[in-house]
């Protein structure tokens, strides 16, 4: 599969070979060539301790999910793209074309999105100089690539000895993004779990107020938490507060932010990263946030709008008008009308 292996007789052996790559292997390869090539260091320089020290300019960690049924995989990824449009709101959603589209002189940036056989969708998430890209590969695989262009963005040094740490970080980012996308498609919680979310829970000392479903403030907080940009390194309260204000279209104070963060933590939806001021969504948090946001935006709001349009032919509008007529008839028959 171009730069990936699609099939192998012994995947365990292949993984073992890949895991053997270490900073020591790269250092030995470099030293072997430096022994053959002319060196700018004189003997006095080397005796004084001057040596070459390798650093990591760019690091890429990829994960390729090959589907037994490519059509289902493509449908899954298109749903992921849809989630980014009305739920995640990342910085960029781009379509990768097979040929370059030139920009004509005097015109603004190219913004048209054309869906056809010659267009491949791509999801791109950016955190400073670190980027995560997902795209459909070879017609049957979902490719997730995390490219780290500045290791200090993730609080890791650039020296070669940090290769294993960067590899683990890239692996975790890819895994969290894929888990988040899977949960967004299978996010319906149990009835008791949903009840614990909307009702107060806990003892008197650790009381967790309920997050009422449909409350405009809760809807705004969940909509901000559904942002896929938090997958990389979590979020800070000031970052979340700005998004909540945009969702609510009204001020959102620091006391309200602190109160909401506290009840989100006590409900087990978010967890604070140790020795930092950042938070991450828990597995339960991702499930409930995606379920509530999708259900409210795509079912409740959409259905109420359709049901109240008198001329709508949508099934829910027709069923609602029929129910309204039958209810009025029943009330009149029982002499309950005012």
Image (tube, rainbow, N blue to C red):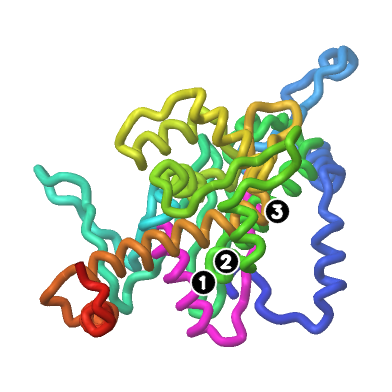
Query: Is the residue 107 above or below the residue 4 in the image?
Result: above
Under circle 1, the secondary element is strand
Count neighbours of disc 2 (C-alpha within 10 A) and say few if under 14, some if 14 to 19, many if 20 or more.
Answer: some
- The residue indicated by pointer 1 is 137
Between discs 1 and 3, the one toward the N terminus: 1
Magenta stretch: give its range. Answer: 59-84
Left or right of 24 on screen, residue 256: left
Q: Nearer the viewer, residue 82 or 188?
A: 188
- The residue indicated by pointer 3 is 171
Question: Residue at (65%, 34%) from the top-left corner?
Answer: 154
Image location of residue 285, percent across then percent down: 62, 52
Quadrant containing the N terminus is bottom right
Cα–Cα span, label 1 and label 2: 26 Å
The mark lying in front, picked from 1 and 2, is 2
Residue extending furthest front?
Answer: 335
Residue extending furthest right?
Answer: 47
Query: Is the residue 308 above or below the residue 148 in the image?
Result: below
Q: Which mark is residue 40?
A: none
Query: Is the residue 318 above or below the residue 123 in the image?
Result: below
The mark lying in front, picked from 3 and 2, is 2
Under circle 2, the secondary element is loop
Under circle 3, the secondary element is helix
């Amino acid at each position: 599969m171009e730069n990936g292996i699609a099939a192998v007789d012994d995947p365990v052996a292949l993984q073992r070979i890949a895991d053997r790559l270490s900073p020591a292997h790269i250092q030995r390869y470099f030293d072997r060539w430096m022994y053959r090539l002319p060196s700018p260091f004189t003997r006095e320089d080397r005796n004084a301790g001057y040596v070459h020290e390798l650093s990591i300019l760019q690091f890429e960690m990829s994960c390729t999910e090959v589907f037994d049924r490519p059509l289902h995989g493509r449908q899954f990824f298109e749903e992921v793209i849809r989630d980014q449009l009305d739920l995640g709101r990342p910085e960029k959603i781009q379509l990768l074309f097979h040929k370059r589209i030139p920009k004509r002189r005097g015109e603004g940036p190219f913004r048209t999105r054309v869906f056809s056989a010659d267009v491949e969708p791509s999801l791109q998430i950016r955190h400073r100089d670190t980027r995560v890209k997902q795209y459909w590969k070879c017609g049957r695989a979902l490719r997730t690539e995390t490219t780290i262009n500045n290791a200090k963005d993730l609080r890791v040094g650039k020296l070669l000895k940090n290769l294993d740490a960067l590899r683990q970080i890239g692996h975790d980012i890819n895994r969290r993004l894929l888990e988040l996308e899977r949960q967004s498609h299978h996010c319906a919680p149990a009835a008791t779990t949903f009840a614990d979310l909307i009702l107060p829970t806990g003892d008197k000392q650790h009381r967790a107020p309920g997050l009422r479903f449909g409350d405009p403030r809760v809807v705004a907080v969940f909509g901000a938490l559904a942002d896929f940009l938090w997958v990389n390194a979590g979020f800070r309260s000031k970052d979340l507060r700005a998004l909540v204000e945009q969702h609510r279209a009204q001020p959102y104070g620091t006391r309200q932010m602190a109160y909401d963060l506290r009840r989100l933590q006590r409900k087990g939806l978010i967890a604070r990263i140790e020795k930092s001021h950042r938070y991450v969504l828990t597995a339960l948090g991702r499930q409930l946030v995606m379920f509530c946001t999708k259900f409210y935006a795509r079912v409740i709001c959409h259905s109420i709008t359709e049901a109240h349009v008198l001329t709508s032919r949508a099934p829910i509008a027709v069923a609602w008008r029929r129910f309204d007529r039958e209810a009025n008839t029943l009330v009149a028959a029982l002499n309950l009308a005012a």
